[in-house]
Image: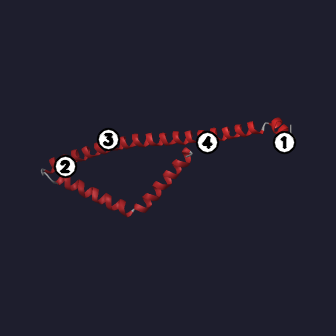
Amino acid sequence: MSLKSSVTDFFKFDELKDNFIKLIEAKFELKKLEIQEKVEEVASRLIVKLFLGLFLAMVFIFLNILLAIGINYLTHTIWAGYAILALIYMILWFIFNTKKSDIEKTIKEKIREGVEKSGI
């Protein structure tokens, strides 16, 4: 028996190497599962929020129609309510369009805070 084989047998380098490789593979799989879990969580939250946003948009649309019909009733016309609401939304669009960069900056900051808070 040679000295090299006896030292290798004594320290069991082959077994240590196999265990080290298995440890690295296990850690890799664990990280992969953690990432997959976070992606699933974010995706499910996003889908739920999209549906809630869709329902909220539908409610908003119906309330706007109801408001326009109410204004039409008060003004005894069939078009004034829709025109007034259209004018209001055009004014809001103009305000948001002029403040677009400030709004984008605020949204980016809120997203950054949310990402830092969640630890993603």
Residue in view at x 48 percent, y 55 percent: 108
Callout 3 environment at 10 Å: few (<14), some (14 to 19), or many (20+)? few
According to the picture, the residue beneath numbered tag 4 turns out to be 28
Horizontal arrangement in the rendering, residue 1 relative to residue 37 (left or right): right
Q: In whole angstroms, how far apart are the C-alphas of marks 3 and 2?
A: 24 Å
At 28% from the left and 56% from the top, the residue drawn is: 89
Q: Name which of mark 1 and mark 3 comes first in the sequence.
A: 1
Coloring scheme used? secondary structure
Instruction: Give the side of residue 24 with respect to residue 87, left or right.
Output: right
Q: Which residue is mark 3?
A: 55
Q: Give the label, 1 or 4, closer to the camera.
A: 1
Residue 20 quadrant: top right
Of circles 4 and 3, the one toward us is: 4
Quarter of the N terminus within the rendering: top right
Residue 71 numbered mark, or none = 2
Tell me where residue 8 appears, x and y as whole percent. 81, 39
Label 3: element kind: helix
